[in-house]
Image: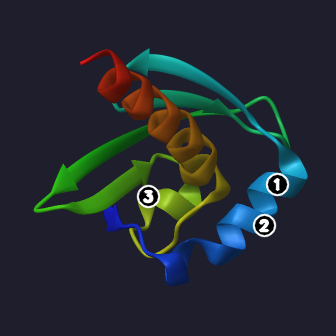
Amino acid sequence: MIKLTTENTAKAIERCKQLRPKVIFIQDRVFEVKSSNNENSYTVRFDVQDGEKFGECECKAGASGKYVCYHIIAAATANIYRQSLKLKTA
């Protein structure tokens, strides 16, 4: 998993805005993201450890553990929304 920071997500955010991939909820903090470039789908997972946010994607860039891909950003947007809904209903 890679720690998600403002610095390492900036490029992926811009790419995600351009490509607008489709995100499907699988289970809490797990999403499927359909690639905008081809027919591929990637599983994205999130975790929070000591207040720090982490994500991982099974695409080539994400699997390296060095880069935040646009799949992580797309799923993070859905994850943030879902988590906020859970807080409102709690």
Secondary element type, mark 3: helix
Q: Decide: marks 2, 1 in contact (CB < 8 A)?
A: yes
Between the residue at mark 3 and the residue at mark 1, the CA separation in whole angstroms equals 21 Å
- Residue 63's disc number: 3
Query: Would you name the residue on which mark 1 appears?
Result: 17
Residue farthest to the left, as pictured: 50
> Residue 90, how many percent across, how many down?
24, 19
Q: In the displayed structure, does residue 31 sit left or right of residue 12? A: left
Residue at the image position 60 percent from the left and 60 percent from the top: 69
Location of the N terminus by quadrant is: bottom left
Does residue 13 appear in this view? yes
Q: In the displayed structure, does residue 59 sit left or right of residue 35? A: left
> Residue 9, how many percent across, how many down?
57, 71
Does residue 30 appear in this view? no
> Residue 39, how many percent across, how many down?
79, 29
**What residue type is disc 1 on?**
Lys
63 up-or-down from 35: above or below: below
N-terminal label among 2 and 3: 2
Query: Would you name the residue on which mark 2 appears?
Result: 14
